[in-house]
Image (cartoon, coloured by chain):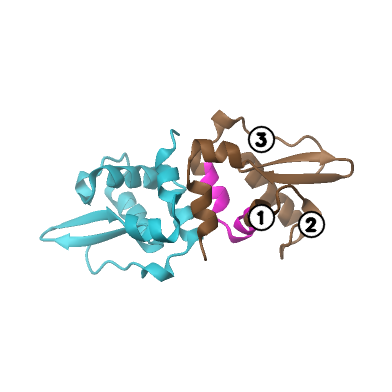
Chain colours: A cyan, B brown
Amino acid sequence: MNGEAVFPERDEIRIEAVLHALADPVRLDVVRQLARSGEVACGALDVSVSKSTLTHHLRTLREAGVTVSRQQGTIRLQSLRRKDLDELFPGLLDGVLAARH
Amino acid sequence: MNGEAVFPERDEIRIEAVLHALADPVRLDVVRQLARSGEVACGALDVSVSKSTLTHHLRTLREAGVTVSRQQGTIRLQSLRRKDLDELFPGLLDGVLAARH
């Protein structure tokens, strides 16, 4: 979780990458938690995977343009790019979050 | 394209499978064509892959619950399960179809 986080500009976000990033149960769970809670520290995410696996999933979400992260002191906060995603793909995120399973 | 096509009941459709099925440029292109045209014969789909590759992609879409197919004489017609998807994941398909890239 060190170094500058890299994420695409809004106009570089591609639908295939977003869909791929969301098509995983752990990443989808992270997205649901961020949708509920806003900014969340990596350590506060409730997931059943190792820290290194979570780091990998968070990178996939970030590089696809689904999330951004920012450093605040010693913690890194994750949040959804809801505004960008809603503008680019109106309804997509709501539809995904509406899924019961 | 022979034999009975297998596809999940509405309540068996899972969001991860739908997102995975949509997260591919060829399959997404097929979905766009079905969204525009309604029922389309496999042979009438405008794709740049071989027939066997297309068959594989159509199976992935069908097994995820994104499409259904039905035999009509010697041709097999594909269509989107728009009603099912809109009920399960309201907005998802519209958001995906709204993507410019």
Q: What's the residue at 57%, 49% (across, down)?
A: B21
Closer to viewer: mark 1 or mark 2: 1
Label 3 close to label 1 by CB (< 8 Å):
no
Query: Could you say whether the residue bearing mark 3 is in a helix, strand or loop?
Result: loop
Q: What's the residue at 89%, 41% (across, down)?
A: B73
What amino acid type should be assigned to the residue bearing mark 3? Phe
Identify the image quadrant of the N terminus of chain B. top right
Q: Farthest right residue?
A: B73
Tag on residue B36? Answer: 1
First along the sequence among labels 1 and 2:
1
Task: Tell me which secondary structure the magenta stretch mostly adopts.
Answer: helix
Identify residue for label 3. B7
What amino acid type should be assigned to the residue bearing mark 1? Arg
How crowded pointer 3 is (Cα within 10 Å; few <14, some 14-19, many 20+) is rated as some
Magenta extent: B17-31
Q: Same chain, marks 3 and 1?
A: yes
Question: Label 1 lies in what chain?
Answer: B
Residue A69, percent across and down?
Answer: 25, 60
Looking at the image, can residue A60 be seen? no
Q: What's the residue at 40%, 60% (across, down)?
A: A87
Along the line of sight, the residue nearer the viewer: A43 or A51:
A43
How many numbered markers are drawn?
Answer: 3
Residue B22: in magenta span: yes
The residues tagged by marks 3 and 1 sit, at their Cα atoms, a distance apart of: 22 Å
Closer to viewer: mark 2 or mark 3: 2
Tag on residue B44? Answer: 2
Question: Label 3 lies in what chain?
Answer: B
From the viewer's perspective, tell me whether residue B68 is left or right of residue B22: right
Along the line of sight, the residue nearer the viewer: B36 or B88:
B36
Query: Could you say whether the residue bearing mark 1 is in a helix, strand or loop?
Result: helix
